[in-house]
Amino acid sequence: MFLRKCEKCGGELRGHAAARLVCSARTSPAIILGVLAVCLLVGFLFVVSTAKQKTPPAPPEVAEIVNLEEIKAKAEGGEAEAQRKLGDIYAKGRSVKLDYKEAAKWYRQAADQGHPVAQTALGELYEAGQGVQRDETEAAKCYRQAAEQGYSPAQYSLAVLYVMGKGLPQDNAEALKWYRQAAEQGDALAQFNLGMRFYEGKAVAPDPVEAYKWLSLAAAQRMPDAAKALDDVKRGMTREQKAEGKRRVEAFAPKRPAPQSPTKG
């Protein structure tokens, strides 16, 4: 014997596995009306109880305290990091009116001193045409300056320009090079794109093990689409290839670029 629940009335179904199941509950109009009445009552009580409950207010966001005068004084004194921070303040409208032109001014002063974060931020303004005239060639120049210092967001952005052929000639081999450098530092977007290139064989021989490695690392950082792509890769891999891919993932340690020390110009 075995027991299961009837999908219609909730009563027990009795019978042998090979026999036709028979509902042990007898359904009558009176029972149906009674069940409906109970359901209506429960629903009414639920609505009333939830209406009385008040959703606790979300804790207010604590705005970052910006000492604008101090930062501006340091920026005007030639400190590159302060100039970069002041550029951020104007680019995000923190404590001041949003002003991309003023942001570009301060980013440029820090970038001229070799500050990689400012160089990347300035490149983004050139690429978007915010605060400066849109100039993808100038954007690529800014990204390259920062990328050559080992700044992974700039390396990724430079790779994308090579893929798209914007601001410089289209070159998948160069894109692969910069994706790899950013991926080795732990950049999730670069890891995903590098993994896809090994999977699809773009500017490199197809390599499912390397694709497994980079897509696994990207998926671990919750990179959208990485998990699905990884599943696609796995379907064509042997057990030995999967084991080697897993070994490479476990052995991965992000590289860190040599620290840069922008000096006053």
Image (cartoon, rainbow, N blue to C red):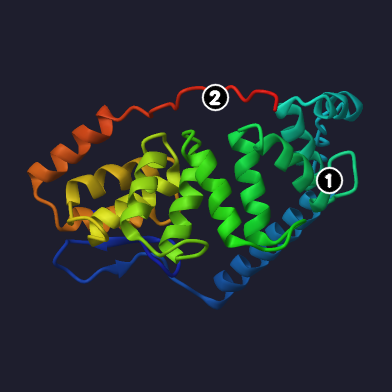
Residue at the location (36% across, 61% down)?
171
Q: Residues within 10 Å of mark 1 (few under 14, many from 20)?
A: some
Local SS, label 1: loop
Residue at the location (31% across, 44% down)?
214
- Contact between labelled residues 1 and 2, with CB atoms less than 8 Å apart: no
Residue hosting label 2: 260
Drawn side of residue 5 relative to residue 168, left or right: left
Is residue 219 among the parts visible in the rendering? no
- Asked whether 112 or 150 is in front, the reply is 112
Residue 178, x across and y down, in percent: 39, 46
The answer to which quarter of the image holds residue 6 is bottom left
Residue 111, x across and y down, in percent: 65, 38
Residue at the location (22% across, 45% down)?
210
Drawn side of residue 100 relative to residue 151, left or right: right
Local SS, label 2: loop
Residue hosting label 1: 93
Residue at the location (41% across, 34% down)?
185
Q: Residues within 10 Å of mark 2 (few under 14, many from 20)?
A: few
Is residue 246 among the parts visible in the rendering? yes
Q: Which badge, 2 or 1, comes first in the chain's sequence?
A: 1
**Amino acid under label 1?**
Gly
- Asked whether 8 or 186 is in front, the reply is 186
Residue 9, x across and y down, in percent: 45, 67
Residue closest to the far bottom = 29
